[in-house]
Image (spheres, rainbow, N blue to C red):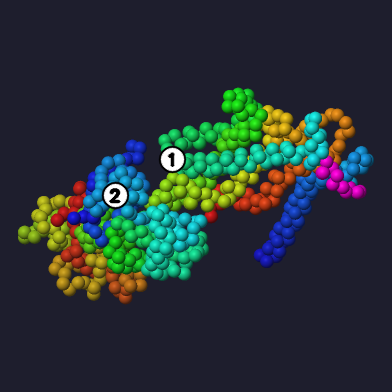
Amino acid sequence: MSAANETVSAGGARTARYFIYAALIILALVYLLPLYVMLSTSLKSLDEIRGGDMLAPPRDPSIAAWVRAWGEACIGVSCVGIKGYFWNSIKMVVPAVLVSTLLGALNGYVLTKWRFPGHKLVFGMMLFACFIPFQAVLIPMARVLGTFGLSNSTTGLVIVHVIYGLGFTTLFFRNYYEAFPDELVKAAMIDGAGFFRIFWRILLPSSGPIIVVTIIYQFTNIWNDFLFGVSFSSGTSSPMTVALNNLVASSTGVKEYNVDMAAAVFAALPTLFVYVVAGRYFVRGLMAGAVKG
Amino acid sequence: MSFLEIKNIRKKIGNNEILKGINIELEKGGFLVLVGPSGCGKSTLLNAIAGLLPPSSGDIVIDGQVVNDLHPSKRDIAMVFQSYALYPNMTVEENIAFALEMRGVEKAQREAAVKQVAKTLQIEHLLKRRPSQLSGGQRQRVAMGRALVRQPRVFLFDEPLSNLDAKLRVEVRAEIKALHQNTHATIVYVTHDQIEAMTLATKIVVLKEGMVQQVGTPAEIYGRPANLFVADFMGSPAMNMLKGKVVSSDGAQSIALFGNEGIKVAMPPSVTVTLADGKDVILGLRPETITDAGLVDPQARATAHIEAEVTMIEPTGSDTFVTGRLDGATFTARTRSDVHVSLGQKFPFSFNLDKAVVFDPQTTSRID
């Protein structure tokens, strides 16, 4: 009798599993649809786009729109494509991500392994920074950048993103290091390692998963940021997101949807790349705090 | 001249006084075990010696040098942690060499030292592995290697065996003992396990609530516990504590158990003072001093034979522990394993009073 029951429940489980897979596949298709439309539109000619069937695959795929978007499209008055802005974004995002991650790791290290009176308050205040909306800091930030002569510069944008990201990176690393055994730090102290040596030699090499999480998080946020970019930069120093907006929103001439789409794909490529390369570490890092291992 | 001196160490955390004036001395080459229940301050004291947790007041002296203000790395000590604290990102070799590297020892010299230690501990084949690829016992050995390679003045062990399974614990315990015998290192060892304390120590310090209860050799601590706490804490099964009253007859004193003059035992020879008649006392008897008639020490000067009802029989293989009930109180006797005894039976127990101790229930101290 129990055997019969098992068969029934096993059959039930299988049906449920099919249902789950079906639901997942449908949802995945829904999520992939915009990407498909972007890619196929970017490969079509303007005539074909005007034909109106958005979901149809390109009849005669061509990368002309991609070439145009990269090197010839007009952004504002200059028609040199988005490539300059792409590099602007790279020049902004790389230092901003590295500096904010490193500082977050140092903060987390101090807040868990070198506790001082009031460490909880300091952490609370850093956490609070995560909840301040971008818009609230625009004017004070503009003032500070102006005072230091960093308005409209990539350096200024890097500083803004580092400061704004510090709350998040500190939170990530503090929670990760909270679970890191104190005894390792004590052992290293007895072995004769100082503050920075313990950090470089013991903690950082053991922080792989959380470094990946932080880098992905920061990279995505900073690369995709529009508000700080549009507020604290202008003209040729703008990041990619601002340039994309200027390209798409320009109201003169013919609307080149294929070029817009190609530019948008360019804008999305770096974050896509980071996820594909480091994605599995991302999940692992998110789970690291949750499961004791 | 003692090698390690702990002078009047106090530690306050908030309003909580964790160590209340600890004084301990240890000679060079000694093996000091700090033992006590959790929360007694033994780990705090060890951390104070290591310099990881500065005491509120008092001095720590190593080899005549006051080390209070020295950084842990400058005290010339090494510590083995309960979790082993092996650096997860380094190989066994790098783990052992790390302290030498931090001290700027040449690479060739480091490698020679690591090799030497690995040979002593028989972990040569593990040198290239990472801690995550080692078993518990192997990690324990690497942790000891990391301490040994430094050749420090004092070794500190913080409950190093508590993460091992029972069989391995006995093995590693023997290894630590052999290591001490071969190297004559000065060791301070923290444990809550009284068997570890008994087997390893040359000197035991029993702590309770931040105060030293007794300092002595294992034999002193076991045979002549200073008070009821030590008597109860050290030894397994615990010492039997039987209430009684002092009675005198014909100039000789004896103890009437539970105030019942029907079950009188002679005053143990350990008591040298004359006690007031009618005084309440507690008679402490180790389980092995209560046996079946066949196991009585023929050399014993003072014995008593008392019949009691058997309420529990626990065979351990080598011996059998028999619980007897006497006037509502129970005691544990250690008998031969092949003793004929059954539950509910009136069994004749033999009490060897030569090794019995007497405590004052008011002060809880031993009466000599």
- Residue at 77% in and 32% down: A246
Do marks 1 and 2 share a subunit? no
Q: Secondary structure at mark 1?
A: loop
Q: Quadrant of the N terminus of chain B?
A: bottom left
- Residue at 39% in and 57% down: B105
Out of B179 and A252, give the one closest to the viewer. Answer: A252
Q: State the residue position of label 2.
A: B208
- Residue at 57% in and 37% down: A166
Horizontally, residue A159 falls left or right of residue B116, namely: right
Q: Secondary structure at mark 2?
A: strand
Disc nearest the viewer among 1 and 2: 1
- Residue B48 seen anywhere in this rendered image of the structure: yes
Q: How many discs mark residues in the rendered view? A: 2
Residue B203 position by quadrant: bottom left
Q: Quadrant of the C terminus of chain B?
A: bottom left
At which x and y percent is residue B17?
31, 41
Vertically, is A137 above or below A167?
Answer: above
The range drawn in magenta is A57-68
Horizontally, residue A148 falls left or right of residue A85, namely: left
- Residue B322 seen anywhere in this rendered image of the structure: no
Q: Is residue A61 magenta?
A: yes
Out of A272 and A288, give the one closest to the viewer. Answer: A272
Q: State the residue position of label 1.
A: A115
Badge 1: how crowded within 10 Å, few (<14), some, or many (20+)?
few
At which x and y percent is residue A105?
53, 43
At which x and y percent is residue A130?
59, 34
Residue B96 position by quadrant: bottom left
